[in-house]
Amino acid sequence: MEYHADTMTNAPQFAPEWLIQSWFNSETPLLLSGLRGRVVVLCAFQALCKDSNAYAIPQALRMHATFEPRDVAVVGLHTTFEHHAAITPAVVKAYLHEYRIKFPVGLDMANPQGPIPRTMEAYHMRGTPSLLLIDRHGFIRKHTFGPVDDLRLGAEVGALAQETPAAAGTAPVSLTAAAGLTPAVPESSAA
Amino acid sequence: MEYHADTMTNAPQFAPEWLIQSWFNSETPLLLSGLRGRVVVLCAFQALCKDSNAYAIPQALRMHATFEPRDVAVVGLHTTFEHHAAITPAVVKAYLHEYRIKFPVGLDMANPQGPIPRTMEAYHMRGTPSLLLIDRHGFIRKHTFGPVDDLRLGAEVGALAQETPAAAGTAPVSLTAAAGLTPAVPESSAA
Amino acid sequence: MEYHADTMTNAPQFAPEWLIQSWFNSETPLLLSGLRGRVVVLCAFQALCKDSNAYAIPQALRMHATFEPRDVAVVGLHTTFEHHAAITPAVVKAYLHEYRIKFPVGLDMANPQGPIPRTMEAYHMRGTPSLLLIDRHGFIRKHTFGPVDDLRLGAEVGALAQETPAAAGTAPVSLTAAAGLTPAVPESSAA
Amino acid sequence: MEYHADTMTNAPQFAPEWLIQSWFNSETPLLLSGLRGRVVVLCAFQALCKDSNAYAIPQALRMHATFEPRDVAVVGLHTTFEHHAAITPAVVKAYLHEYRIKFPVGLDMANPQGPIPRTMEAYHMRGTPSLLLIDRHGFIRKHTFGPVDDLRLGAEVGALAQETPAAAGTAPVSLTAAAGLTPAVPESSAA
């Protein structure tokens, strides 16, 4: 139940479109832009990563069970950045079966130039597990590497889910300074 | 991390004023009505209660550390409903010291007619630990006996904290049906 | 599951008789010397001590459920060394009821000269929770302050329980150097 | 910390030699018969098995850190009985790297006749994780499927480690009836 190792952008950042080579648990390719209007919880993991298995995936499963999908979309991103020869799509598929994961999981697009796949690179992720909260307007409001406290995460996702299109950009009022939600982009800087 | 044993009122209920014989961690007596405008998290516990010690008090401490006091007031209620001869005010005081509890704790007013103290009786609590969420307008939105899931609780408190005076009564949109927040009182039934 | 803060005597030490003002869960006063021939697990705790409640008492209950009483006697020692006005015998009694403790618990004898009760002083305990393993011959083989790893503790108690009168003093062969069992007193030094 | 789902042989059974297609963390092939004289803790697991990852492998790592290798040999057995196409030797290798496993792990020999590999079949394992305790004389003293309590396991391994060649077959005296160690083979039946 610790909370640390945040990697926060100083200024709110628009979430780039993810680049996916194949999807599991989704009949059609999913676009981040297609989820606009919903809060997106993006859980980046690796099938053989100890910390992903120990807490990030269990937490993602709890989030998927807790929040209404029409408001909060939980999406997995399998970022193969090591053990490339071992972690085939069949491994990811078996993993999803064993961990009973029903939410959509995208396999991050391999990068011919190096070991870091494309979405992982575009988001400057430090490793797995990484967690991103993207608001209804597509801005990154939280980006974390490592364990995340359940109570705080629940409050943060709950707060983002309360931001309606009209009230978007309202700073969450309920959390202590350490809460870690980047304020929504101000009107002026969005112009 | 389970979630069960809710005792929910079918209709939203106005939270009665608590009846306290003495306060710890508060220089002046605290009135529930004096906290109107803030979300109140009321944690009812007993110093020698195993489950209070194992999860309810640790969770209350996490809530106190997570939410802004100006929006969310975490308040303890020590309901002495058994072991009356043993649990003196000195025991409660020593307990608060040992568990490093800094939020206000009221000692529920003893009832000459029976073992159940006055606030516990007025709220129909089933035992300890019990948890109540009271919204900014003074309505009981959640009443639970037993363990409460951190992620869901965070989301619920976060949602209640987002209800502004103008938007009060807005049903939280983000949680699954099982979430357990009683809807705020509808306009018509409040007439 | 950490293991630290051992306070080990450099030389094996004969366990002094405990000094108890009253017993719970035992119809007659219990003497340590009366348990000679059995391994004694002595769990020193305080009713309002957070760490006693969080892990030491639950571990003592697991030990009591795991080992044969004829071989391993689990005994609690309530050492009131602070909050003297609060922690009356009625508090200890209520505590044992709430935590469903069935093994014998002695209330350490108050010391008119100071706050540290007599047995706690005689054993040089640093606080609560403290754990002592006393072998079948009455020697202290382990003395720990703070959390103790279940697996290692199980192995240590299991090893001590295997020391028969004939084979007493056999150094346990199975544990890594960090194991923390003081070797039994050598024959020569016992003379 | 529960303890269930034992599959115990009614009579002590001699542990058959394991059949391994390749070894990790061991420069030469390891024979069970070559470990005669030591207690063997055999932990059967699968790289993508949720329960193996959540508790069995962490427990095996704790055992490896707790017991002296010259007395207690912790050995992993990767039993690929499902997801055969996914779980290549490269997956097992990457898994051992990620979980920082340093004890020897054998890859159970594939069976051309069916999905269950050879050692898994010979030992009648029900799935993963399975745990076997084999005594210094090569007899199976415990065979469990599912979670195993640390305290009890520590005591059991500790007790088996105390069985010297001379005293072999001594029934452990310290554990409650539920302990789950199959008695060592009686002298008469060994004849």
Image (cartoon, coloured by chain):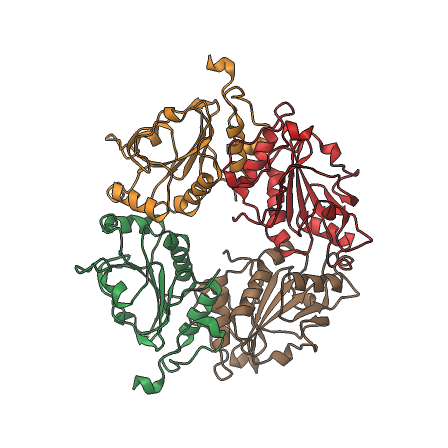
Chain colours: A orange, B red, C brown, D green
B186 to the left or right of A7: right
**Quadrant where the C terminus of chain C is found in the figure:** bottom right
Q: Which of C137 and B74 is in front in this view?
A: B74
B53 lies above or below D38: above
Q: Which residue is drawn at 37% across and 78% down?
A: D184
At which x and y percent is residue D73?
35, 66
B52 lies above or below D187: above
Q: How many marks?
A: 0
D162 to the left or right of C134: left
A92 to the left or right of D60: left
Viewer can see residue A88 = no
Q: Which residue is drawn at 54% across and 35% down?
A: A155
At which x and y percent is residue B118?
77, 47
Residue A56 figure quarter: top left
Q: Which of A130 and B38 is in front in this view?
A: B38
At which x and y percent is residue B53?
63, 53
Residue D106 figure quarter: bottom left
